[in-house]
Image (tube, rainbow, N blue to C red):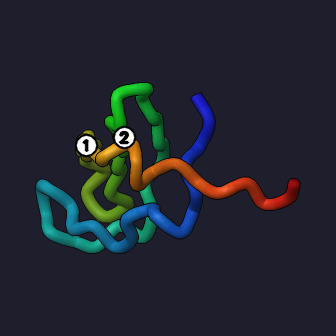
């Protein structure tokens, strides 16, 4: 699926294992139901985990950049 607008990406999420901040997710996947899945990988302890967010689709649709 298409990658979501980069302005909405979570940044510096703490690692679920050691608590170190992770700058950006390694993978982002969007679903048709407003679900966005983020795959995080900690460079400090090499722990990988997934976080899922559910958004109201009416707020996730972007305006076209040009006519």
Q: Are marks 2 and 1 in contact (CB under 8 Å)?
A: yes
- Residue 4: mark: none
**Vertical position of residue 23 compared to residue 66: above or below:** below
Rendered position, 21 above or below 32: below
The residue located at (42%, 70%) in the rendering is 23
Identify the residue at horizontal 42%, vertical 28% (top origin): 31
Q: Nearer the viewer, residue 1 or 62?
A: 62
Image disc number at residue 36:
2
Mark 1: which secondary structure?
strand
Q: Nearer the viewer, residue 18 or 57?
A: 57
SS at mark 2 in the image: strand
Q: Quadrant of the C terminus?
A: bottom right
Q: Identify the image quadrant of residue 11.
A: bottom left
Q: Is residue 28 above or below residue 24?
A: above
Q: Residue at x 43, y 26 (%)?
A: 32
Q: Looking at the image, tell me whether mark 2 or mark 1 is earlier in sequence order.
A: 2
Percent position of residue 42, x then y: 32, 57
5 or 50, which is in the foreground?
A: 5
Q: Position of residue 28 (x, y in %)?
A: 47, 42
Residue 34, how many percent across, how many down? 35, 37
Q: Classify residue 7 as left or right of residue 11.
A: right
Specify the label residue 54 is tagged with.
Answer: 1
């Amino acid at each position: 699926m298409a990658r979501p607008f980069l302005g909405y990406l979570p940044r510096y999420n703490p690692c679920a294992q050691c608590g170190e901040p992770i700058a950006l997710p390694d993978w982002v996947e969007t679903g048709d139901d407003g679900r966005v899945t983020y795959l995080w990988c900690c460079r400090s302890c090499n722990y990988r985990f997934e976080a899922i967010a559910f958004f109201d689709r009416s707020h996730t649709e972007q305006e076209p950049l040009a006519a």
